[in-house]
Image (cartoon, grey):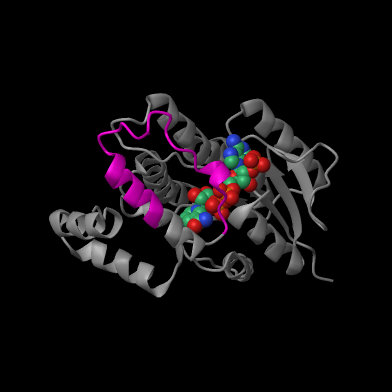
Amino acid sequence: MVQQKTVWITGASSGLGLHTAMAFRDDGWQVIAGARSFGKDGSGIDGITCLPLDVTSEDSIRAFCESAAAIAVPDALVQCAGMLVLGSCEETDPEEFRRVIDTNYLGMVRINREVLPLMRANGGGKIVLFSSINGLMGIPFQSAYTASKHAIEGYAECLSMEVKPFGIQVMLVEPGDHRSGSDKYRPHAAAMGGNSPYAAAYESAVRQIHHDESNGSDPDILGRKLAKTLDRKRIPFRKRIASADQHLAVYIHRFLGARINSAILRKYYIRQG
Ligand SMILES: NC(=O)c1ccc[n+]([C@@H]2O[C@H](COP(=O)([O-])OP(=O)(O)OC[C@H]3O[C@@H](n4cnc5c(N)ncnc54)[C@H](OP(=O)(O)O)[C@@H]3O)[C@@H](O)[C@H]2O)c1
């Protein structure tokens, strides 16, 4: 009999994390999901064990890992928890930057520190870290988010080299726009308003960002692709899941100089007057 595999998924109460959790469940995995909005009784999503988890709190992470490990040590860990703050670099407060980095990047660092010893003792495992196209290029008025995703990209390269001898594989997921995210996790920086010197450019960029997300790719397909990929013995280090034009944008970005890249992105996001 084939033994059921276990995946732990963070940020699984909504968006891509939720769709990914449901795809793994449908593929026969035992899924243990974490998010702040889950209660302690394990309920929340059919066929999935849901446990409370705040990735910015060491205590919460420890409690989550203890409860989850009492059920099953993970064969795979998928880290989706994330948020962003929209705002100009000038008007986004360091505390707002801190919140984004703390959730998106340090959250992953903290959880990996708890999970790596379990995977080492188990003889291996797979760690999936949610980056973004923003992990590869900057987008105006998303600097905190872009910085957090660039940090994840660099961190993942280091991690994968270090843990390879223990049979642990690391994969970065770089989604393009998907119609899954909630505005709840995309607050505007407190200082952004009509009096901002960036107001017109900001409004244009936010409109474009919103348009691209609401017309983005299907989150179910992303979930299914990930579940299928994690079923393989060897997983790729990078998996970009994006529309054809976003794949092309990344490809072009790699070969063009900074000045041309910046002109293209400014023209796309900042359409004033
Ligand atoms: N949607 C896209 O187009 C897109 C594109 C590229 C990358 N991504 C990445 O994909 C991931 C999911 O984003 P999304 O837009 O699909 O989902 P989302 O709707 O923004 O959901 C965010 C998830 O993160 C959880 N979360 C936020 N802060 C948390 C914390 N401190 N501790 C634990 N969980 C926390 C939320 O749950 P609770 O509030 O219940 O804690 C929620 O489940 C993120 O890493 C995002 O950067 C998304």
Tell me where residue 85 sits by quadrant. Answer: top left
At x 71% / y 48%, what residue is drawn?
Answer: 33
Foreground pick, 26 / 200: 200
Tell me if I can see residue 117 in this picture.
no
At x 57% / y 58%, what residue is drawn?
Answer: 180
Q: Is residue 180 left or right of residue 240?
A: right
Q: How many marks?
A: 0
Q: Is residue 89 left or right of residue 235?
A: left
Foreground pick, 202 / 54: 202
Examine the rendered structure and indicate whether residue 106 appears above or below residue 246: above
Foreground pick, 6 / 83: 83
- Bounds of the magenta span? 180-208
Tell me where residue 40 sits by quadrant. Answer: top right
At x 43% / y 61%, what residue is drawn?
Answer: 212
Q: Is residue 191 magenta?
A: yes
Examine the rendered structure and indicate whether residue 76 appears above or below residue 39: below
At x 43% / y 51%, what residue is drawn?
Answer: 161
Tell me if I can see residue 205 in this picture.
yes
Locate the N terminus and report the quarter of the image it occupies.
bottom right
Residue 237 location (% of width, % of height): 45, 61
Examine the rendered structure and indicate whether residue 99 appears above or below residue 264: above
Tell me where residue 114 sits by quadrant. Answer: top right
Examine the rendered structure and indicate whether residue 8 appears above or below residue 232: above
Q: Is residue 122 left or right of residue 4?
A: left
Residue 143 location (% of width, % of height): 34, 41
Foreground pick, 109 / 220: 220
